[in-house]
Amino acid sequence: MEKPFEYDKSRQPANSAFKQQKLPGHYLRLTATAVLSIFFTTGLFCLCVGIILILSAKSTKKIEVNYTKLCADCHELRDDASKFRKACTCSIPFNLPEKMKGNVYMYYKLYGFYQNLYRYVLSRSNAQLMSKNIMDVHGCDPFKMSEDKIPFIPCGAIANSMFNDTIILSYNLHSSEHIQVPMLKYGLTWWTDKYVKFQNPVSSNLADQFEGSAKPPSWSVPIYELDRDDPGNNGFLNEDFIVWMRTAAFPTFKKLYRRLSREHYFKEGLPAGNYSFNISYITRFQGEKSVVLSTLTWSGGDSLFLGLVYTVTGALTWLSAFAIMAVYLMLKNRKENLSL
């Protein structure tokens, strides 16, 4: 006769409500009215937020000037390798039909520049940028060292391709008087970039700290001379450099270049009138380049993406609610007919 199976009571869970699953349970059973109320309320909320965001984005003032063809002479000059380093400046007049009130920001916009390539994104040395080891060029292929085996500072493909056109905005106060619009070159970066991800060596003389290094091949000056007017805006803490090093996700993008200093004639913003961009054209590539002047609102810039997302989500939610209501009414009428 077989011996009956006996459980090992030493492994039996304690006789508690939690371990024996005796806790009270609640089964959520929503009525059709509750479900439809949730759908209609959510859809209404998304539609309202979407419309508000779209109206806010539409209220921004923006003007864009594409200078790729307007500076064609400078572009062609870059095709001649012997004249690649030769300075070339082009002036582009334009008219601002309406006043730009408040803070005004200047961006450079690139079309067809792919910063999202995998090898391009990885081609940098964070240890070098944080000054933990400025001679560390690990991971910076193919821009690690010069032909003389001197390490590049900064190294990597991102740094080497840095946007380095110089853009100056001038205002035609009178027919014969042109004044340079005061623009600020600080306050452009994220706080985490400026004070966490990028650091200069602790030294009063950056040139001594970067001795024994070479500038990237496409740069005209070493990193410690990026801003000769402001010593604090040099090295890895140069704000134009930090802005460029944050790579863009799409091939068409714009990055903050300057912001308006609200003083003298520009206390309230940019007045309507005639202006001109004076551009020292240095960088060339197969895409296009533009300058953008824009104001901002509480919700950001002129992008309609977020507002459209909310609006479409709200519309789809309402359509789903009507579909659910139609199915519910059909089944309810069928059930009533069967009961008769």
Image: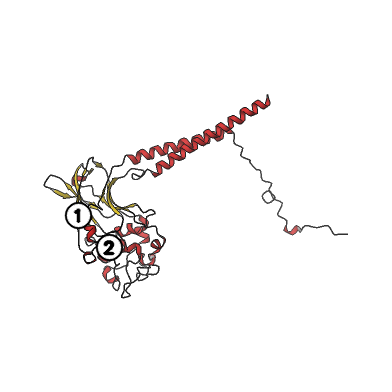
Disc 1 versus disc 2: distance between alpha carbons? 26 Å
x, y (%) of residue 146? 31, 72
x, y (%) of residue 212? 29, 74
x, y (%) of residue 28? 61, 39
Residue nearest the observer in this picture, 229 or 169 = 169
- Whether residue 24 sits left or right of residue 162 in the image: it is right
> Circle 2: is it few (<14), some (14-19), or many (20+) Cα within 10 Å?
many
Residue that numbered label 1 is attached to: 90
Amino acid type at circle 2 is Asn
Residue that numbered label 2 is attached to: 234
> Circle 1: is it few (<14), some (14-19), or many (20+) Cα within 10 Å?
some
In the drawing, what numbered circle is on residue 302?
A: none
The quadrant of the image that shows the C terminus is top right
Give the image's coloring scheme: secondary structure
- Whether residue 142 sits left or right of residue 333 in the image: it is left
Looking at the image, which residue is at 37% across and 60% down? 196
| Count of numbered badges drawn on the protein | 2
Q: Earlier in the sequence, mark 1 or mark 2?
A: 1
Q: Relative to 218, is 255 above or below?
A: above
Q: Secondary structure at mark 1?
A: strand
Q: Secondary structure at mark 2?
A: loop
Residue 79, picture quadrant:
bottom left
x, y (%) of residue 279? 22, 55
The quadrant of the image that shows the N terminus is bottom right
Amino acid type at circle 1 is Cys
Which residue in the rendered view is the most extreme toward the bottom? 148
Q: Are marks 1 and 2 in contact (CB under 8 Å)?
A: no
Looking at the image, which residue is at 48% across and 38% down? 316
- Whether residue 291 sits left or right of residue 132 in the image: it is left
